[in-house]
Amino acid sequence: MVQSGDYSSSKSAASPDQAGDLTSLYVGYALILFAVPTFGVAAAIGLLRMWRKAPPSDPLARSPFVFQQRTLTAAVAAIIGGVVLILINVGVFVLFVMAVWTIVRGALGLKDLLEGRPIRHPLRLFY
């Protein structure tokens, strides 16, 4: 976790590739957390962004990347399924469960990233 006084002006802290991967991971978590308030638009943008990008080479950055792909794919699928299921009065429940699941999963993943820990099982649906 970054705290005051942790900044050093030396360039040995992180390579430009690692800094770009870290920034990309933070943007991914922001899109996951904004998926609910934007009614899924942020999730769709995040999913399109993930499809274009190759996984990071750093093992510490790879697990959050896979975690974000899985989260965004499941969120977009649940949104589409929930909208279709509104016709039979189940869709609102599906959308509510998806909203809670997406926010909790995004917050827990972001917490691990801030603490510098990899996600142990990034392919699980439940954290």
Image (cartoon, grey):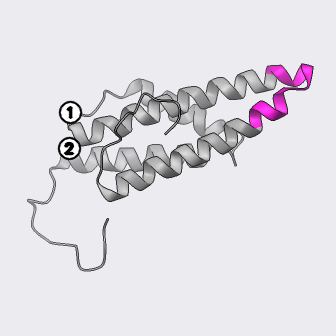
Q: Tell me where the magenta segment starts and ends, as one range.
A: 84-95
* Image quarter (top left, top right, bottom left or bottom right) of the N terminus: bottom left
Nearer the observer, 121 or 96: 121
Q: Earlier in the sequence, mark 2 or mark 1?
A: 2
Which residue position is annotated with label 1? 57
Q: Amino acid at mark 1?
A: Ser
Query: x%, y% of residue 24?
Result: 37, 44
In-image side of 107 versus 25 (left or right) = right
Give the mark toward the camera: 2 or 1: 1
Q: Residues within 10 Å of mark 2 (few under 14, many from 20)?
A: few
Query: x%, y% of residue 115?
Result: 33, 58
Tell me whether circle 2 and circle 1 mark residues in contact (CB < 8 Å). yes
Q: Residue at x 10, y 61 (%)?
A: 11
Q: Residues within 10 Å of mark 1 (few under 14, many from 20)?
A: few
- Magenta stretch prevailing secondary structure: helix
Query: x%, y% of residue 80?
Result: 71, 23
Q: Residue at x 48, y 29 (%)?
A: 70
Q: Residue at x 52, y 33 (%)?
A: 71
Residue 17 marker: 2
Distance of label 2 from label 1 (alpha carbons): 9 Å
In-image side of 123 versus 8 (left or right) = right
On screen, 66 above or below 19? above
On screen, 24 above or below 74? below
Q: Amino acid at mark 2?
A: Asp
Quadrant of res 38:
top right
